[in-house]
Image (cartoon, rainbow, N blue to C red):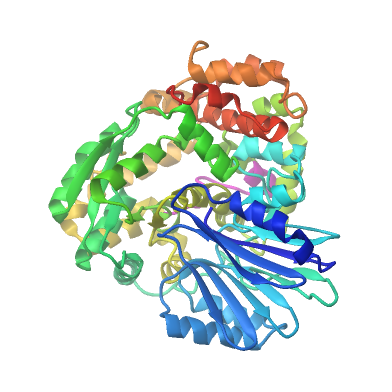
Amino acid sequence: MPGISFVFSRKSRIKEESGRIRSALENLVHDDGYSSTSALIGQALFLGYTRHKQYSVAEIEDERFFICVDGFVFNRGRSDLERSLLSVAAGMPDCAGKVREWMEGTDGEYAVLITDRETGDTIIFNDPLSRISLYYSEDKEGLILSREPRFINYLKGGAGLSRDSIFEYLLFGYPLSGKTLFEEVYRLGGGKMIKLNTESGTVLTERVHSFNYQEKRNSGGSIGEHAGNLASLLEDACRRRSSPEGKNVVSLSGGLDSRSVSTCLSNRDVPFAAATFLDAYGIVGPDVEYAEMIAEALGAQWHLYRLHRARGRQLLDLLSRLSGLNYLGVSHTLELFESIAANCGSGFTLFTGDGGDRVIRDTRPVGPVGSMEALVDYILKYNSMLPLHIVSDITGRQEPFVRDRLLEMLGGYEEDDYKMKYLQFIFSERCPGWHFQGEERSRFYNRAVTPFYASEVFRYSMNLPDRMKKNYKLYREILVKLSPEIASINNSEWQFPITSWKLPFYGLARRIYFSLPDPIRKFVEYRLRWSRLRGAYTPDSPVRQCLEKQIESGSLDQYLNPDKIREHIDSMEKMGFDHMFTLTSLIEMESTGISSIAGYADREMI
């Protein structure tokens, strides 16, 4: 992952360890398009970073302070960025208030490091939503922090895998509460700051910014007024994120989110091309017709990319770069990146609609949630990658383990309302642990952006009463404000437009669906979405053969039960299998240093 890597040595042994630290940094140079730089070296501190041409790492300094900004700040020019961050630095070490104020005035996805050259004191903080992932580990030797866990693992001589985190990863797709799959390696939560004092050797982590989703500061005004304001904010966010070179590509489906992004760019006269992909399974087939209609209506150049199943070498590339943070079922997108670059030229900015389904729509649980136990049940029911009983069987961990973990975590949230606690879970756990990692994958290769998490858009929308978002009422008004013509084109998932009279009945059907008993709901889901819920691969498929080799090697035995994997494998849906295979592949690679996938480098697997 492009971005910063940092080491603090309590024993001031940076000089002695510099060779090993640089070797760890070089391990993050993933291809010929990457470069590495050692930006700051002292007795106790090391800062380096890797980058490619589309990724930003900026250095700011004066006689006293050194500042490094990793990622993108969209609403501050260079002079404003320098002035504002040097003002924050002048308040060190007790600068939490200034950092919070800076965050609230900044639109971006970033990590910031500030070092006082006179004292060696250093602060590191990221954006309020943790749009940029930072991983860290602290022990008696000091602190190691990086955009990639593998930098930390290299310097620690292998961090080892956590059994508890393996359970949570297999269940949800990510470990909870900022943990990672690796022992004593953590992900920095959004709006948090690490403070270190080189003289005393202390390292403290504090939260300087938080969201309370129960507070609704935009409760007045009409839905039309708010829709107009949000439409304007989205247009501004798209314009700020557009490529300085004019090379913009929208990943366009037939849904609501990417069409909103495309329309915003068109309304602000930002040039862009539209890219729609058709996967090997035809899962997104319905998107193609409507995506082409949207592009034609906006006068945008449109390209359809027909993708193959991902080959073993693509799986290995994704696994080695993201250390399991992305499940291998999305490896086919690497072919998409290559195809867009071949067609549109390298150096493009990739726009997506990520986040629209959570920021603009009603994200609250459907139906009543009257207790913490009921909220835990809802989370387990609708946020699991594999059924809980299968995860328990494979890992040997019992159900009370995860229920107790969720109760403890939810109990620590500021919100009192159970549905608002669910929003906190989505934006502080699921988004950084799962959704944002898809964007991190794109950042390995391109400049990838979305307007829905722009600070002004997010704050404005989250402060609206949730009833305005119910049944897509707010989204409908926003799309009509942006373009009545685009709003009138069918949503591929519904086969009717958001302006249709059918929409309220769809909302009613959705509420009924969520209230159905599990067996009936799963039957309805299978009938309606069979192609997305394809069963596991046949026993003679390359991916099943590869999994069997991993099992036979004995590398999984320490963490998983191979017999239980074999017992449940035929009942797994494709996404669940792909996710489990990601975990088994990571365990094998971390345990042995090699991967059975290498034997399938040129074969289509997933």
Residue at image location 75% in from the left, 83% down from the top: 119
Splitting the image into 4 quarters, where does residue 135 fall? bottom right
Whole-percent x and y of residue 382?
55, 39
Is 534 magenta? The answer is no
Splitting the image into 4 quarters, where does residue 54 fall? bottom left
For the record, the magenta segment spans 361-376
Instruction: Specify the farthest residue to the top.
Output: 540
Whole-percent x and y of residue 556?
71, 25
Q: Is residue 312 above or below residue 468?
A: above
Residue at image location 61% in from the left, 16% down from the top: 548
- Which image quadrant: the C terminus? top left
The secondary structure that dominates the magenta segment is loop
Is 365 magenta? The answer is yes
Residue at image location 54% in from the left, 75% down from the top: 103
Left or right: 267 in relation to 392? left
Is residue 386 at least partly visible in the picture? Answer: no
